[in-house]
Amino acid sequence: MKILVTGFDPFGGEATNPAIEAVKRLPATIAGATIVKLEIPTVFGACATVVRQAIADEQPDVVLSIGQAGGRAALTPELVAINLDDGRIPDNVGQQPVDQPIQSNGATAYFTQLPVKAMVQAIRAAGLPSQLSTTAGTYVCNHIMYQVQYLRATAFPGLRAGFLHIPFLPSQVTTKPGQPSMSLADDVRGITAAIAAIVAAG
């Protein structure tokens, strides 16, 4: 099995993004699966172009996208992506869509093909907080989750794909009182456990 794992670059004025930092630190193989790592831009549209090319080049069995969810205290696999871009802040090239469909001919929503409940249990078994999320938001995280599902529906029918949100790093909350965080080492451990659950599901 080959799994393409993507992580966003920093955005929103942050100096770092735990998503790509964790992805970079994943082992080359997890539970026998080959891990391909890809940094993607926090940019509506462009992120999907980069991932589509990687899917065409690498022919992965699974795409797992990782994103930062500031304010969440747990690792949260996403159940569903919706056909809506609505940016609370501009992306990294200044785009800030409002109530825009992602794909005019796409479904209203797509559900993940990944075993999200098993992923939650695997992360918890690793000693880390995890819960299932039913909203990936309307920013670039939801955008890439939706776009990969659209690619699956229109061009890569054998693909399985999903999204996992992770909290801020401790270094990101030094000036954000009350905001939860998680260490990079725990991020890596949690993502690794989630991927092992994906592999186990076949």
Image: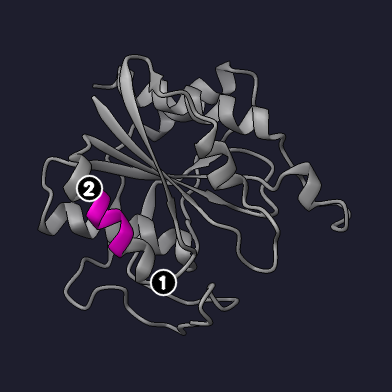
* Distance between mark 2 and mark 1 Cα atoms: 18 Å
Residue 44's mark?
A: 1
Q: Position of residue 73 (x, y in %)?
A: 69, 42
Residue 69 visible in image: yes
Name the residue at 50% across, 38% down.
23
Residue 106 in which image quadrant: bottom left
Q: Position of residue 126 (x, y in %)?
A: 59, 17
Highlighted magenta segment, given as a residue range: 49-54
Tell me if residue 194 comes above or below residue 77 in the rendering: above
Question: What residue is pinned by disc 2?
Answer: 55
Q: Name the kind of residue labelled 1 in the image.
A: Phe
Circle 2 SS class: helix
For the residue pair 47 and 69, the one nearer the viewer reads as: 47
Which secondary structure is most common in the magenta stretch? helix
The quadrant of the image that shows the C terminus is: top left
172 relative position to 156: left or right: right
